Amino acid sequence: MTLNWERILKLAAEGNLEPPKTIRKSKDEWASQLSPEAYHVTRSHGTERPFSSDMCSRVEPGIYDCVCCGTPLFDATEKFDSGTGWPSFTQPIEASVVAYKADHSYGMTRIEALCNVCEAHLGHVFPDGPAPTGLRYCMNAVALAKQQG
């Protein structure tokens, strides 16, 4: 399935794709597994400071997983330096691994990106990315773990 802005808006409004699996844990289980910053971002829908990670500007081969559940989310071939201070990608590794939700916080409407497996907050999606998708998945670096190897 090709993702574009219209499809993202439709998924956010009408329901997301079926996840490949589901993982649910208690707040205490997540807190014991994650760093305080990763917990704040992924489980409390926080945001890390822009430019707080060198992951933004590094573009090297690899796969980026959800820091909470280990689900592969993004391939580095879709990564680009957006200049925003957060790692950015043009599309997920598979359409079913990211869920979308309208976010009306801070007096604006954005589309929140969540891990579709464990419901971790990853960041937001915007329609100002490069071709061919036109999407910019603006992710929090602490929500991602780059696979070793």
Image (tube, grey):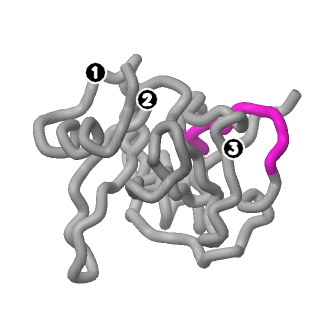
Q: Pointer 3: residues within 10 angstroms few (<14), some, or many (20+)?
A: some
Q: Residue at x 60, y 71 (%)?
A: 84
Q: Quadrant of the N terminus?
A: top left
**Where is 37 relative to 120, above or below?**
below
Q: Pick the residue in front: 73 or 41.
A: 73
What is the CA distance from the residue labelled 1 to the residue labelled 2?
9 Å
Q: Pointer 2: residues within 10 angstroms few (<14), some, or many (20+)?
A: many
**Where is 17 relative to 134, above or below?**
above
Q: Pick the residue in front: 137 or 52.
A: 137
Q: Which percent across, then down, holds residue 96? A: 38, 25
Callout 1: SS: loop
| Residue furthest to the front | 131
Circle 2 or circle 3, nearest the eye: 2
Q: Pick the residue in front: 73 or 27.
A: 73
The residue stretch that appears in magenta = 59-68
Callout 2: SS: helix
- Kindly identify the amino acid type of the residue bearing the numbered disc 1: Glu
Residue on which disc 1 sits:
18
Residue 145's label in the rendered image is 3
